[in-house]
Amino acid sequence: MSIDPPGSGSTVRRIMLGASLRRLREAQGLTREVAGFHIRASESKISRMELGRVGFKTRDVEDLLTLYGVSDDAERRGLLEMVREANTPGWWHKYGEVLPNWFITYVGLEEAASVIRTYEVQFVPGLLQTAAYARAVIQLGYPDAPDGEIEQRVHLRMQRQERLTRPDGPRLWAVVDEAALKRPIGGGGIMREQLQHLLEVATLPNITLQVMPFRFGMHAAEGGAFTILRFPESDLSDVVYVEQLWGALYLDKREDIDPYLTAMEQLCVESTTPGGTAEILGEFLRET
């Protein structure tokens, strides 16, 4: 299996290609309706293309480039090559039968991110879970799922973690509420293994783990869990991911992102230091 460098995954390539097409259209003063008519499509399809939320047909992109006055061969070749890259399925698409589309989108973005900042209330973050803990969490969420499906989901979660130990792996900064660490998911043995695992991964140079203790009282993220993804490509804005019971929100507008950035900064200031994290995890481990 080939490994794409950060920022080169198909999900991010779709977003980058869509943003390029939007800039070219706007430079020509054309509406999405005019662009859609030119490729025998609707205005809403042009909108979805420019947001990177659909696949791209080479013919459509060629026609749009002509409409937008892109005649330079090198520029056209570069954008059409991006079409091929954007349409190449990522390794995670093989799990499409057991995962909803809204989460497949997240995995693609996570795979391309260079910095992942997350706050969790209910559970240990998925990227820091042991296989046994992940299995217990997934069984809680999908009590009627057959064993084979459960194992596929566990395997995907473990595969997502592999990037953290690669030389080009992302920077992970996780703040975990004390409630998640006190909740005995799977029983005492599984929780002890999970807490020991957190102690170990917290020593990795690209992982920062902080705990938000109960004693700190109210804090900046009372609204619940969220993740902020940052990408190495300067053309891409941060994306905030907020998971709900049967879906997720993806926020990429500055006015929507800023409150989450502020909340994360405050959480990091108010939570334990790395040394304090090791101390509190040790306490929980002795109590489990």
Image (spheres, helix red, strand yellow):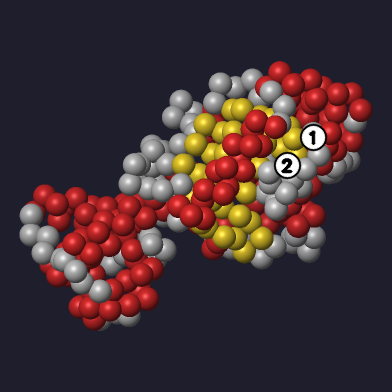
In which image quadrant can residue 71 be found?
A: bottom left
Along the viewing direction, whichever of 113 and 236 lies nearer the viewer: 236
Q: Position of residue 114 (x, y in %)?
A: 46, 36
Q: Is residue 256 above or below residue 279?
A: below
In this figure, which residue is indicated by the disc labeled 2?
Answer: 219
Give the residue type at disc 1: Phe
In which image quadrant can residue 119 be found?
A: top right
Give the residue type at disc 2: His
Label 2: how many Cα within 10 Å (few below 14, some 14–19, many 20+) = some
Q: Residue at x 60, y 60 (%)?
A: 248
Q: Which mark is residue 134?
A: none
Q: Which mark is residue 216?
A: 1
The quadrant of the image that shows the N terminus is top left
Label 1: how many Cα within 10 Å (few below 14, some 14–19, many 20+) = few
Q: Is residue 218 above or below residue 62?
A: above
Residue furthest out toward the right: 287
**In the drawing, does residue 145 fall left or right of residue 257?**
right
Q: Position of residue 2 (x, y in %)?
A: 40, 40
Q: Position of residue 145 (x, y in %)?
A: 74, 61
* Residue contact between numbered discs 2 and 1, judged by CB atoms under 8 Å: yes
